[in-house]
């Protein structure tokens, strides 16, 4: 005898099949045509007034064509809706940009070239140090400057040596070096004043016996003398930088017999009062050779009038030698 449980499933299956056939027949028969009395309207779902009833059938969504891959971006495109697709195929391959080294990520260049009147033309670029202070050293000169917002500095300054080597020290302590050959340096006499910090020093040059305040009196605020072509004073270093190294350099053509007298100003300020200030003077006058002199000055107490200053003559007055 067959088990009872399977027979129940068979009976249910037979009844279900007969019921489906009857339903299909009734759907295909027009009751009105057969004279069959119609029953009440079938129940419809309740809806708010004004709502639109939408009837429809479920349809299989159309499969969207696979997008065309970008060149060199996809190694294999796998259609996940396609059962025949190789499940072991790689999906994507990303061609990433090559990693840049630290040196490439922070490009740094220092170039020098000779300029007019025995000057050095400097071009510095350090894109990852935009706005940062740098220290520039050449021979006995040292001064602090600031890179612009693009990490660039372009400037010129008088050379103190024919073989001009320049070292730039970055905020990280890293240094850049470059050289330039200054062929006309022997045609120019140089006097330089070098110091550090907020000390209020200044270099003054008096051409051809000029007194203080005369037209031939040269200083950083009046750097050029129309009566002496080729003579000038240039100020180096950004005074807005804390502890900045600074310098002022006077240049004068050697082929002029005009005498030049120098003096150093030390001004009384809230930062300098009551202190002993130190500086260095570099002199190459073309007659007695080159020499370097250290100097110091004791400033008055802070109760002294602000703005007062002392003028100290350079230890040995420089005189430009005539080439005749």
Image (spheres, helix red, strand yellow):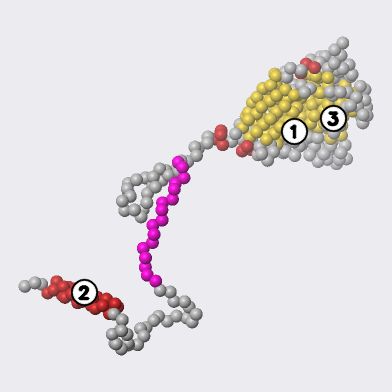
**Residue sitting at the far left:** 1
Q: Which residue is mark 3?
A: 223
Residue 136: x, y in percent?
A: 69, 29
Q: Which is the main secondary structure of the residues drawn in magenta?
A: loop
Of 291 and 300, which appears nearest the observer? 291
Q: Which residue is mark 1?
A: 237
Is residue 60 inside the magenta stretch? yes
State the count of labels. Answer: 3
Q: Residue at x 19, y 73 (%)?
A: 13
Q: Which residue is mark 2?
A: 17
User: Where, by quadrant of the figure, is residue 231 drawn?
Assistant: top right
On the rendered structure, is 68 left or right of 154?
left
Q: Nearer the viewer, mark 2 or mark 3?
A: 2
Q: Which residues are magenta?
A: 56-72
Q: Dot 1: few (<14), some (14–19), or many (≥20) neighbours within 10 Å?
A: many
Q: Residue at x 31, y 53 (%)?
A: 83
Q: Nearer the viewer, mark 1 or mark 3?
A: 3
């Amino acid at each position: 005898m067959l088990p009872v449980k399977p027979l129940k499933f068979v009976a249910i299956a037979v009844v279900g099949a007969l019921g489906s056939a009857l339903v299909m027949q009734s759907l295909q028969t027009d009751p009105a045509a057969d004279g069959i009395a119609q029953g009440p309207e079938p129940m419809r779902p309740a809806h708010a007034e004004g709502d639109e009833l939408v009837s429809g059938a479920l349809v299989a969504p159309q499969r969207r064509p696979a997008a065309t891959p970008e060149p060199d971006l996809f190694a294999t495109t796998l259609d996940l809706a396609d059962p025949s697709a190789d499940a072991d195929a790689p999906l994507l391959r990303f061609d990433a940009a090559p990693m840049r080294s630290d040196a490439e990520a922070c490009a740094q260049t220092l170039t020098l070239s000779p300029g007019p009147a025995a000057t050095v033309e400097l071009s510095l670029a350090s894109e990852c140090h935009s706005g940062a202070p740098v220290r520039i050293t050449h021979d006995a000169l040292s001064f602090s400057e600031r890179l612009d917002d693009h990490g660039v500095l372009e400037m010129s300054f008088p050379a103190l040596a024919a073989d001009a080597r320049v070292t730039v020290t970055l905020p990280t302590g890293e240094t850049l070096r470059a050289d330039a050959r200054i062929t006309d340096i022997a045609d120019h006499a140089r006097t330089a004043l070098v110091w550090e910090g907020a000390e209020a020093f200044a270099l003054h040059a008096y051409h051809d016996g000029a007194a203080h305040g005369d037209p031939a009196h040269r200083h950083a605020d009046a750097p050029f003398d129309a009566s002496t072509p080729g003579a000038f004073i240039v100020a180096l270093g950004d005074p807005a930088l804390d502890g900045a190294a600074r310098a002022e350099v006077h240049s004068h053509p050697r082929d002029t017999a005009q005498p030049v007298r120098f003096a150093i100003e030390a001004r009384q300020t809230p930062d300098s009062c009551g202190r002993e200030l130190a500086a260095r003077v570099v002199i190459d006058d073309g007659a007695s050779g080159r020499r370097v002199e250290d100097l110091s000055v004791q400033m008055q107490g802070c109760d002294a009038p602000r703005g007062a200053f002392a003028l100290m003559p350079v230890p040995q007055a420089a005189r430009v030698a005539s080439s005749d």
